[in-house]
Image (tube, rainbow, N blue to C red):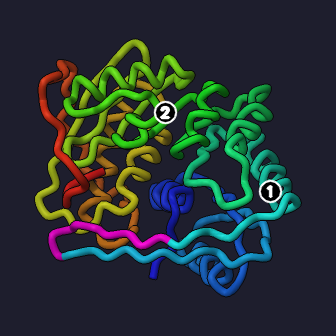
Amino acid sequence: MDSGGKGVNIAGALAAHGHPVTAVLPCGGPEGSQLRAMLTADGISAAIVPISGATRANISIVEPDGIVTKLNEVGPELSSSEISALIDVTIDTAKDAEWLVACGSLPPGVAEDFYELIFVRLAAGNTRVALDTSGPALLKTLSANPDVVKPNVDELSEATGVQIVTLGDAVRASHAMRDLGAATVIASLGPDGALYSDGVHTVHAEAPVEHPRSSVGAGDALLAGFLCNGGSGFGAFAIGVAWAAAALALPGTRMPGPSQVDASRVQVHEHIESDRVLSKGETRSSY
């Protein structure tokens, strides 16, 4: 059993590299108590917002070749007072931070403008914001002009209306997402690596993994590695891809430490192979 969820994974990756980080999350029920204990054991600082419902528990079935099947429970519905408390604790925790990463699907009862409200309240300060969510919450929050957005292929296609078959399609969709408000887009392309676009540079990168064990959390490692190595430019992006590749070689949701990250394995392509057809579905080497 591991602690998990996008935010927890990112916090775990940063903590593994010695970066100060605080995970802000709602917790309730026996599962919430277990999660708090696991975070403490993993050395992850957490700002906990108590809720009456039980924290959800998800199951990931990892096959010997690394293919993952996820069985995710529906999260508990949050009351209006719990939502307000979660926003206030997030703002208070992030006000002096370098980055706030808002990630994951929204629980029942939470409006699609939840992340947008937080980003708008932080806009007057120096905290930069990154977003990793999907559906209406993604579209709504793009209007708040996040510094970084990290969609996967499906999220990128849904948000922009671009059907993504080739690498060139992914480039066009990334540019379209920037037109919707994102300053920088880092798109996870599964077994085809990842794409970076910031309005100046658009590059594709990949890092083959000889013996992948689990893709769970690899995209979170990608974003964490990018943010803690400057959070801008394709140099930081390449390091993020190295973090993702390292995560693929680990079991479960374990995040890689410095000794497990090998930046030399990353191949950065400044010339985009536009006609390259992307692999379909999640495979054993995806992030």
Q: Is residue 144 magenta?
A: no
- Snapshot quadrant of residue 47: bottom right
- Picture layout, residue 8 above or below residue 41: above
Q: Is residue 18 visible?
A: no
- Picture layout, residue 132 above or below residue 217: above
| Residue at left offset 37%, top offset 36% | 187
Q: Residues within 10 Å of mark 1 (few under 14, many from 20)?
A: many
| Residue at left offset 74%, top offset 40% | 118
Amino acid type of disc 2?
A: Gly
| Residue at left offset 68%, top offset 64% | 46
- Picture layout, residue 11 above or below residue 102: below
| Residue 245 drawn at (x, y percent) | 26, 52
Task: Find the residue positioned furthest to the top.
Answer: 200
- Find disc 2 in the rendering and name its residue: 231
Looking at the image, residue 116 sits to the left or right of residue 162; the answer is: right
- Find disc 1 in the rendering and name its residue: 83
Looking at the image, residue 247 sits to the left or right of residue 209; the answer is: right
| Residue 115 drawn at (x, y percent) | 68, 42
Residues shaded magenta: 64-72
Looking at the image, residue 203 sits to the left or right of residue 154; the answer is: left
- Picture layout, residue 248 above or below residue 128: below
| Residue 232 drawn at (x, y percent) | 46, 27
